[in-house]
Image: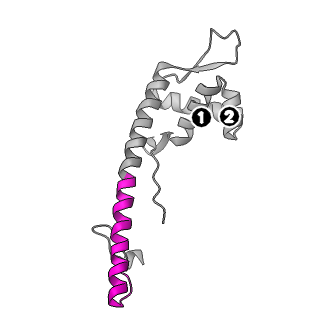
Amino acid sequence: MKLSIKLFIENNGKYIFGPGRAELLRAIDRLGSLSKAAQEQGMSYRWAWGRIKEAEKALGVRLLAPDTGSGKGNTKVLTAEARQLLEWFTSIEENMYDVAHQAKIKSFSLLSDSIHAAERSDQPPQKWLSPGSNSQQRA
């Protein structure tokens, strides 16, 4: 059994930012190049640039700027807004993972207790369901 969660920022049902774009920004920050980051992430430069531009438009801020200190025109750096976005996103992700981990421990404990109780009583184990769940809907 695997508990999986992902954080996405949406506006009116339209995807704006999530784990993929966060990883792309981290790679750009580490490599100093959108082209190298896109290649590392297994996507074309055009696709990566399009995703960055979509996020910038939806968020109303620039995420990348040319690195004027590098002397190379293709080098990109994260803007202060991009760094703030990544810091905020990472913080929420980490908190979500902590909560999910605790929920997983609790659910596995409840499931394990149910299985052990059923083994002692020769009854089939009852499925552990979240509060308000209907076993017929889940089966």
**x then y, percent, for residue 42:** 70, 41
Residue, x 43% and y 42% (percent of image)?
A: 93
The prevailing secondary structure element of the residues shown in magenta is helix
Residue to which mark 1 is pinned: 24
Residue, x 53% and y 36% (percent of image)?
A: 22
Residue to which mark 2 is pinned: 38
How many other residues sit within 10 Å of disc 1, few (<14), some (14-19) or many (≥20)? many
> Which residues make up the magenta segment?
100-125
**In the image, is residue 119 part of the stretch drawn in magenta?**
yes
Quote the CA–CA distance across marks 2 and 1: 7 Å
Compared with residue 51, is residue 114 higher up or lower down, i.e. above or below? below
Residue at the limit of the structure toward the left, as seen here: 132
Q: Are marks 2 and 1 in contact (CB under 8 Å)?
A: yes
Q: Which mark is residue 6?
A: none
Residue, x 52% and y 28% (percent of image)?
A: 56
Compared with residue 50, is residue 106 higher up or lower down, i.e. above or below? below
Foreground pick, 107 / 11 = 107
Determine the secondary structure under disc 2: helix
Q: Earlier in the sequence, mark 2 or mark 1?
A: 1
